[in-house]
Amino acid sequence: MTRSYITFRDLSREEYQEIFHRAAQLKKDRRAGRYLHPHLAGRSVGMIFNKNSTRTRVSFEGAINELGGHPVVLAVKDTQMSRGEPPSHTARVLSRYLAGLVIRTYEEKELADLAAWASIPIINGLTNQQHPCQVLTDIFTLLETLGQARLEDQLVAWIGDGHNMANTWLEAAAVLGFGLHLACPSGYEPDRAIFQRAHSDNPRVKLFGSPKEAVKGARAVNTDVFVSMDQQAEAAQRLKDFQGYQVNSEIMALASPQAIFLHCLPAHVGEEVTEEVLESPASLVFEEAENRLHAQKALLEFLIPRL
Ligand code: CP
Ligand code: NVA
């Protein structure tokens, strides 16, 4: 059966445990100079971008290469998709060439439409609604700091925009069972249905009225830009409305003494986070960026059966 990865809920807790375990092995191997694990030998994996990317593009491209495969990277505007070729045709054509397809675009429905017709895994490289490869990596990064402590016993704080990253953290808390406290300005809360479902699956998922309340005791403090790629038109209003939602030293001081700071990057330093926090020892943002490579290798191995 072909498995796609469109939302965090597409995999189970046990499957995540397997992926985290494999990502740790792959990271250790790579650090020891063993880059090549030829799971995808001789095969090609596509990546289609309808928005900018640094990390997703380069980490997936490297991951596919280090798994012995060939990455085929396309901008939507260079494909016939931008001239109206329907997803039902595109998906069936690409399934005949590729072993998997990563796609970054606007609406989740575009991925669902491709997945309905594809016979290869479709992997969400970010939509307006979700960013599951990032949150997979973020949780792997948090796990690396926990030692013997259990993920389920941890509290994660989300401060800022209730957009794609926050929605995905909600789904992750539902699947993996950790506490999640969010503080978002009024009108910028996460998707209501995603929140309700996550809260009913895991009552430790809660919305707070202020960052100071949400961050109390958190083992990881997480934020994202105030203006995402699909929100450029609202930039001026957003920067006003997000006043008071910056992660700074005062906020970090209210979290657990062992708290780490996470950010998917790119960051707008001085807006959602201060330079002091981003560059502090608690900040794992560059480790987190590296971990995209390891986590996505493990994900590709999991989703694409070896021949
Ligand atoms: N975090 C992330 O997805 O970064 P890019 O936009 O650079 O891919
Ligand atoms: N929320 C951001 C994440 C970028 C990786 C965006 O969608 O632009």
Image: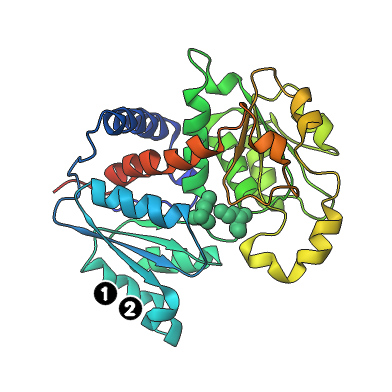
- Residue type pointed to by label 1: Val
Q: Quadrant of residue 205?
A: top right
At a point 43% along the width and 38% down the height, the residue shown is 291
How busy is the neighbourhood of tag 2: few (under 14 within 10 Å), some, or many (20 plus)? some
For image coordinates 41% across by 57% down, the residue present is 57
Tell which of 1 and 81 is nearer to you.
81
Label 1 sits on a secondary structure element that is helix
Please name the amino acid that badge 2 sits on: His
Q: Which mark is residue 187?
A: none
Residue farthest top in this picture = 148
Q: Is residue 124 visible?
A: no
Whole-Å distance between the Cαs marked 1 and 2? 6 Å
Query: As displayed, is residue 126 above or below residue 236?
Result: above
Residue under label 2, please give it: 89
Q: Is residue 164 something one can see in this rendering?
A: yes
Image position of 201 with respect to 160: above or below:
above
Q: x, y (%) of residue 283? A: 61, 32
Q: Position of residue 143 (x, y in %)?
A: 49, 25
Number of marks in the rendered image: 2
Ligand 1 neighbours mark 2 (CB distance < 8 Å): no
Q: Residue at x 83, y 64 (%)?
A: 237
Q: Does residue 96 appear to the left or right of 13 in the view shown?
A: left
**Residue 181 falls in which quadrant of the image?**
top right
Relative to the observer, which residue lies in front, 127 or 13? Answer: 127
**Horizontal side, residue 281 vs residue 85: left or right:** right
Label 2 SS: helix
Residue 36: horizontal and vertical position, in percent?
Answer: 20, 41
Asked if the residues shown at circle 1 and circle 2 are in contact, with their CB atoms under 8 angstroms apart, the answer is yes
Q: Which mark is residue 93?
A: 1
Position of residue 236 measured from the top left corner of the image (x, y, whole percent): 81, 65
Instruction: Tell which of 81 and 226 is nearer to you.
Output: 226
Residue at point 48%, 69% (across, down): 110
